[in-house]
């Protein structure tokens, strides 16, 4: 089996390259920048994907393409109405890659995000059938890319697998999870004890194994799949991380109205929603279709991540 991997030099892509190599999958890696990770690929190219890219040449001989390099994360904090020409151009690039793959019968595996469905919180447990209401330009672009990929596959009789997942944790990850990690690691009392919520998480290792099992089952079904390690409350997550670091939880409670008010603030609202709101997934469809299971139990993966963040040891 030969797989084209775009975004191979990124946080997920570089780790996925190593995993696919270990599984005996031949890879053609594409990255915007050169790097040590590309040496793991059977073939590698340093290139920025654009609407003018020769996708036929990139896809030559490939059985599947794993698309990580859509570039949409640059607009994570903008509202959907902020759509502009550069964002549209990147969407066109993904659309043309999907069309080229579908015409050649190459299966597309696209890493999307749960933000294609919602914002920082969701009132009900999300399934693949839940309505998609993205609250950011990033989420809107991901949703439009999903639909373009699915349409191309349907038009040409090929298959596409789209993975939606929640916040990713693991050594080296940045963004919102790194900010939460720093907060959890700080030896300060935090007003989290009264929060009763459920938030889904996924480790980088589990996300990579999900992609691996899909790649290695070429006859598996297509469509949209949710994936996560499990869900826990914010107090449980912070307590678990702090105990892994050998510290007491140091959590206290404040009235629930404080969190509701904080969630409406223009700057701190999104963080308050991540801390106090619900965002839980049901990934039973993926587990039934592909037999996937998390790389490790959520509690164990969180503890390894917490300790690795200070010791420098990988997950």
Image (spheres, rainbow, N blue to C red):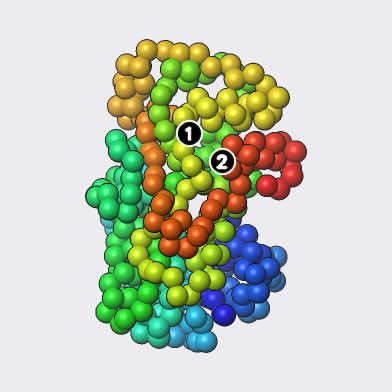
Residue 172 as seen in the image, left or right of residue 85: right
On residue 232, the disc is 1
Q: Could you tell me which residue is drawn at 49 percent across and 66 percent down?
A: 214
CA gap, disc 2 and disc 1: 9 Å
In percent of width and height, residue 201 lies at 49, 42
Q: Is residue 168 above or below residue 106?
A: above
Mark yes or no: residue 46 visible.
no
Residue 256 as seen in the image, left or right of residue 13: left
Mark 2 and mark 1 lie on one chain; the one further toward the N terminus is 1
Q: Could you tell me which residue is drawn at 52 percent across and 87 percent down?
A: 61
Mark yes or no: residue 39 visible.
yes
Local SS, label 1:
strand
Q: Could you tell me which residue is drawn at 44 percent across and 46 percent down?
A: 166
Q: Is residue 277 above or below residue 10?
A: above
| Front position in the image: 195 or 140 | 195
On residue 298, the disc is 2
Quarter of the image where one finds residue 13: bottom right
In percent of width and height, residue 62 lies at 51, 82
* Marks 2,1: beta carbons within 8 A: yes
In percent of width and height, residue 279 lies at 38, 38
| Front position in the image: 275 or 299 | 299
């Amino acid at each position: 089996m030969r797989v084209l991997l775009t975004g191979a030099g990124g946080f997920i892509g570089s780790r996925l390259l190593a995993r696919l190599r270990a599984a005996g999958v031949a890879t053609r890696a594409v990255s915007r920048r050169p790097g040590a990770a590309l040496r793991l690929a059977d073939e590698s190219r340093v290139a920025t994907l654009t609407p003018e890219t020769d996708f036929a040449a990139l896809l030559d001989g490939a059985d599947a393409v794993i698309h990580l390099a859509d570039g949409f994360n640059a607009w994570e904090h903008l509202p959907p109405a902020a759509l502009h020409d550069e964002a549209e151009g990147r969407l066109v690039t993904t659309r043309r890659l999907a069309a080229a793959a579908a015409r050649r019968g190459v299966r597309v595996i696209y890493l999307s995000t749960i933000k294609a469905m919602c914002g920082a919180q969701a009132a009900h447990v999300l399934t693949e059938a839940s309505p998609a209401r993205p609250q950011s330009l990033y989420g809107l672009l991901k949703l439009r890319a999903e639909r373009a990929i699915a349409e191309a596959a349907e038009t040409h009789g090929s298959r596409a697998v789209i993975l939606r997942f929640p916040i990713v944790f693991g050594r080296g990850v940045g963004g919102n999870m790194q900010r939460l990690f720093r907060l959890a690691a700080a030896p300060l009392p935090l007003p989290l004890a009264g929060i009763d919520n459920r938030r889904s998480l996924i480790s980088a290792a589990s996300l990579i194994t999900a992609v691996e099992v899909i790649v290695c089952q070429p006859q598996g079904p297509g469509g949209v799949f949710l994936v996560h390690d499990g869900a826990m409350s914010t107090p449980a997550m912070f307590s678990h991380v702090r105990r892994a670091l050998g510290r007491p939880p140091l959590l206290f409670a404040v009235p629930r109205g404080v969190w509701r008010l904080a969630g409406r603030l223009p700057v701190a609202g999104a963080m308050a929603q991540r801390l106090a709101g619900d965002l839980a997934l049901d990934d039973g469809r993926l587990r039934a279709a592909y037999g996937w299971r998390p790389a490790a139990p959520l509690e164990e993966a969180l503890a390894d991540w917490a300790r690795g963040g200070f010791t420098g040891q990988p997950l």
